[in-house]
Amino acid sequence: MNRRELLLSAALAGLTGPLRSVAHSDETKVPTSTHEDEVLWTRRVPVKWDVDIAIIGAGMAGISAALSAARSGMRVLLVERFAIAGGMLTTGGVSNFCGEMTGQGEVFDAIVEALHAWNAIGHERPSVFHYEILAIVLQELLLKRSVKVLFHTSFVDAREQDGRVTEIILRSKSGPEAVRARLFIDCTGDADLARALNFSVFKGRAADGLQLPMSMMYFVRHVTGTPPVPRAPEGWFKRLENETDLPMTSVWPDGPDGNAIKIKIPMYDATDTESLTAAEIQGRRRMCEVMDYHQRVEGKPWMLDHCSPTIGIREGARIEGDYVLQVDDLRAGRTFDDGIARGTFYLDGHKPDDDKRTYILPQDELEVPPYQIPLRSLIARDGKNLLMAGRCFSCDQLALSSARVSTTCSMMGQAAGITAALAVQQGCDVRDVAPAEVRRIVLERGAILDV
Ligand SMILES: Cc1cc2nc3c(=O)[nH]c(=O)nc-3n(C[C@H](O)[C@H](O)[C@H](O)COP(=O)(O)OP(=O)(O)OC[C@H]3O[C@@H](n4cnc5c(N)ncnc54)[C@H](O)[C@@H]3O)c2cc1C
């Protein structure tokens, strides 16, 4: 085995460590790969799709962008690496909307209306929904508006000329394929398209790049009687004895006989494969420890039902836009001439280097008034036809801690879809679209921008 293979097998065995050690973690750490060889990889790839607008990432932002662009009459391709739509809300098991649920625009309204029609929202709280049903709702809405959806398809690379993205390269079971489009929207949460082109991006805390912590979501069923319940055998994981040993743990009802549980997993990098792999492994390890604590120490009649398919990621990388939204804009409840979305959630910024319930700011500084998001923070500074929406829009880390919630991501996505459609219709660069025209359509489609 060469050094790289050794490191890879160490990572797969769960040995690769986080960015830095956390006091609560008992992981064995080995250095991440430092292999620096390069190979040149060239290959002719068929242009399989030629569309008006290509969107990468079918989370709340990408779906909202796709649905709004399609409503404007565009031919839209939506690319998603996983098998279902919804992003963090489904694959991350989030299953709850934060922020105001009215006045987000017709896309969000259509999603909530469909969830109500399915009787799949509002049982425990008005904002809590059944996430498997959300996945169905989203795919059907996309198909109704004739969005071409590709699941199991990853964005890999992009071609660019003078700041204009010309094609993107996808990888799927069909092999590598290219997509040509007039406009591209990066909704990956991790700025994958922008990073592939070396466009300017930000990551994490300004001082050290540490991202907002991840969390693992898992779901337990209540066991009646005494059926055999799967439990971690002695010696597999650390036994936690006291509540103080637990990471930040949030417990909600999940139907009449179950609970949804969220545990904090800090100090990993969502844009680094080895770190992300280690985060998933550590997330499941911590889940086993906390499960065992609840069963053994607290005597809870809980059985593991399932863990979310992917760890919950709050922050990946943010693309530098024509404007970088700052936390002070939020504190001031700022409006902009090109304001096209509105944030209504508090500064939910947990400390990046701590797995307890600790915030970056003191409790009395978390609330912010409603604020606007300018169109300029959805336009990639280094591109002529690249927009972004959702977790990877242009902002600082604390502004993201509020604007990352799904309602606001949907608003940003809707505005990005409208802007992209206008740019295609007018045959112009994205920054030449009149913001007043975008605002007019955003308002016409039911969004409230008043602060
Ligand atoms: C643990 C946790 C709890 C949260 N709780 C709440 C809550 O209660 N309420 C709330 O409103 N918000 C909550 N949030 C925040 C919210 O869920 C997300 O920030 C929001 O949904 C992000 O939407 P998005 O579309 O920007 O990104 P994502 O949902 O992350 O979507 C990005 C999509 O892009 C895809 N993708 C990425 N890279 C590629 C690629 N290279 N090729 C193809 N596809 C790609 C991903 O698979 C994904 O589907 C929570 C987040 C976390 C992590």
Image: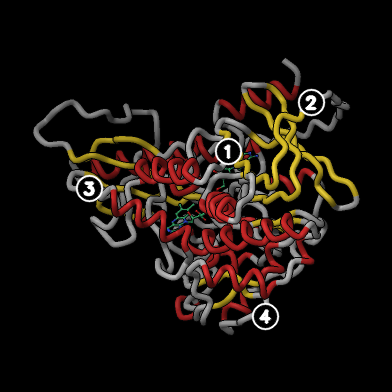
Q: Amino acid at mark 4?
A: Asp
The residue wearing badge 4 is: 337
| Label pair 1/2, CB-CB below 8 angstroms | no
Q: Is residue 319 left or right of residue 255?
A: right
Q: Amino acid at mark 2?
A: Val
| Label pair 4/3, CB-CB below 8 angstroms | no
The residue wearing badge 1 is: 148
Q: Amino acid at mark 1?
A: Lys
Place residue 231 in its image quadrant.
top left
Residue at the location (52% across, 64% down)? Answer: 408
Closer to the chain start, of discs 4 and 2, is 2
- Evaluate whether residue 216 shows in this view: no
User: Which of the two discs, 1 and 4, sits closer to the camera?
Assistant: 1
| Label pair 2/3, CB-CB below 8 angstroms | no
Binning the other alpha carbons within 10 Å of mark 3 as few (below 14), some (14 to 19) or many (20 upward) gives: few
Closer to the chain start, of discs 1 and 2, is 2
**Cα distance, mark 4 to mark 2?**
43 Å
Closer to the chain start, of discs 2 and 3, is 2
